[in-house]
Amino acid sequence: MSSTAWQLVGWLANRRNAVRPQSPVEEEVTALFVELSVPLLRYLHNLGLPVADGKDIVQDTFLSLFYHLRKDKPRDNLSGWTFRVGRNLARVRRNGRDPVAAGENAAEIACPDVGFNPQEQAASCLFHSMFVKDCPWE
C-alpha cells in the first residue's frame, strides 16, 4: 500500500473515532436525563412496574422528549412533561401487559389455586371456563 493510501486510512480512522459535537437539543436532553432519569425510574417503580420495564419506559420517555424538542414544541415545565409522559407510558405498559409474554401462566392468574377442595376447584373452573380456556384443574 502506498504512503498516500496509508494516510487516507489514518485520516478515515481518525474521522471515525472523532466525537461529533452535540446539538443544543441533544445537550438539553442529556442534561435532563442526568437530572431526571433516577427520579423518574423511582416514580415508575412506585407505580408498580418492575425495574426492567421502568428502564425501558425511561428510555422511551427521553426519546419522546428528544423528538418533542427537535420539533420546536413548547419547553414549558419539561420535568413535569417528562413525568407525565412516563406515567402515560407506564399505564399503557401495565394495562396492555400480556401475562404470558411476561412469563406468567395466564390460567394461574385467572384461576388461582387458593387451597380449594376438589369440589370448589371444579366449581371455580366451571365459572372461569367462560373466560379462560385452559384451567389448570381440568
Image (spheres, rainbow, N blue to C red):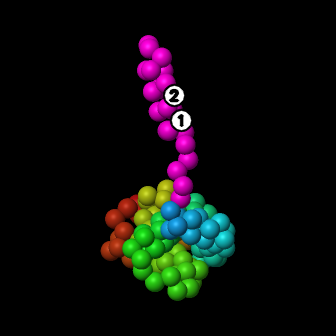
User: What's under tag 2, amino acid-wise?
Assistant: Gly
In the displayed structure, would residue 47 be above or below residue 14?
A: below
Q: Position of residue 122 (x, y in %)?
A: 44, 70
Q: Magenta residues?
A: 1-22
Q: Magenta segment: does it hold 16?
A: yes
Q: Position of residue 135 (x, y in %)?
A: 41, 63
Quadrant housing residue 36:
bottom right
Screen quadrant of the N terminus: top left
Between 33 and 129, the residue placed more toward the observer is 33
Q: Which mark is residue 40?
A: none
Q: Within 10 angstroms of label 2, few (less than 14), some, or many (20 or more) residues?
A: few
> Is residue 138 something that shows in the picture?
yes
Residue drawn at x 34%, y 65% as measured from the top left? 133
Quadrant housing residue 79:
bottom right
Residue drawn at x 63%, y 76% as measured from the top left? 43
Q: Within 10 angstroms of label 1, few (less than 14), some, or many (20 or more) residues?
A: few
49 left or right of 122 in image: right
> Is residue 120 something that shows in the picture?
no
Labelled pair 2, 1 in contact (Cβ < 8 Å): yes
Quadrant housing residue 83:
bottom right
Q: Which residue is mark 2?
A: 10
Q: Secondary structure at mark 1?
A: helix
Q: Main secondary structure of the magenta part?
A: helix
Q: Position of residue 44 (x, y in %)?
A: 59, 73
Between 109 and 53, the residue placed more toward the observer is 53
Q: Which residue is mark 1?
A: 14
Give the alpha-carbon distance from disc 2 to disc 1, as whole Å.
6 Å
User: What's under tag 1, amino acid-wise?
Assistant: Asn
